[in-house]
Amino acid sequence: MDTLTPFTARRIHDLGDDEKPREKALSQGIRALSDAELVGLIFGGGLPGMSVVDLARAILRDCDNRVDNLARLTMDELMAKYKGVGPAKAVCLAAAFELGRRNREQLAENRDVTIRSSEDVATMMSPLMESLDYEEFWVLMLSRNNKVKYRRCISQGGTAGTVVDVKLLLKRAVDCLASGIILVHNHPSGNPNPSVEDDRLTRKIKEGAAYLDIRVLDHVIIAHRKYYSYMDEGKL
């Protein structure tokens, strides 16, 4: 198990009121808190001789001071890697990230989005998928003017793949009266390049959709901070 070396570690009681996360949030607003203070507020308590903010700061430093890197850690990884992070802290942090993910998902659902490029797809779907440690396969159902009518998660799988029922996928598209569909799935490995199975599945869905007069407009693979588009690469 890794241990964190404190840098000028202080107990929470040694901090001034304007440095304590809870008091600072109440007096200045939640947006005034740094990333470390937000994580510290979620954790609730630190280590003997080390404030919760210093604990959070050290963990973030180990994640290159990027919250998105922290969000990619599983609860088991957090508990195994960092002294002072037990089940309670790991679950609370995971819950906070999940709540944020659901908020982004619901906000996106309420927007009248028109898809003009693969970048639009990535902008919509990356916040929901790039931090997952397992694969999900989604379908965007589009109207004739390329507005997103519905989004559906067709399947969830493991770290190396997911099983897609093509008949179910096409039924969902017909039920939504979609004129076009965009396929989206993620690669937890961080490599956005399609596999042989991805190519095979894309062809199969495209052929089936053509019989129903539904266009497959793109297949976008989401990875960490990047994506791959079948349309952009001329593979559709």
Image: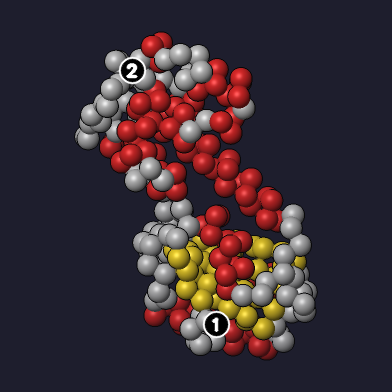
Provide residue 213's location: percent of width, then percent of height: 72, 87
Image quarter where the N terminus lies is: top left
Query: Can residue 144 be seen in the rendering of this structure?
Result: yes
**Residue 102 drawn above or below residue 222:** above
Q: Which of marks 1 and 2 is nearer the N terminus?
A: 2
Residue hosting label 2: 10
**Residue 192 drawn above or below residue 39:** below
Helix, strand or loop at mark 2? loop
Query: Can residue 164 be seen in the rendering of this structure?
Result: no
Residue sitting at 44 percent across and 56 percent down?
134
Q: Is the residue marked by circle 2 packed among few (<14), some (14-19), or many (20+) residues within 10 Å?
A: some
Image quarter where the C terminus lies is: bottom right
Provide residue 197's location: percent of width, then percent of height: 42, 77
- Pick the front one: 52 or 156: 52
**Kind of residue at badge 1:** Met
- Give the spatial CA distance, label 1 vs label 2: 54 Å
Residue sitting at 60 percent across and 24 percent down?
28
Residue hosting label 1: 231
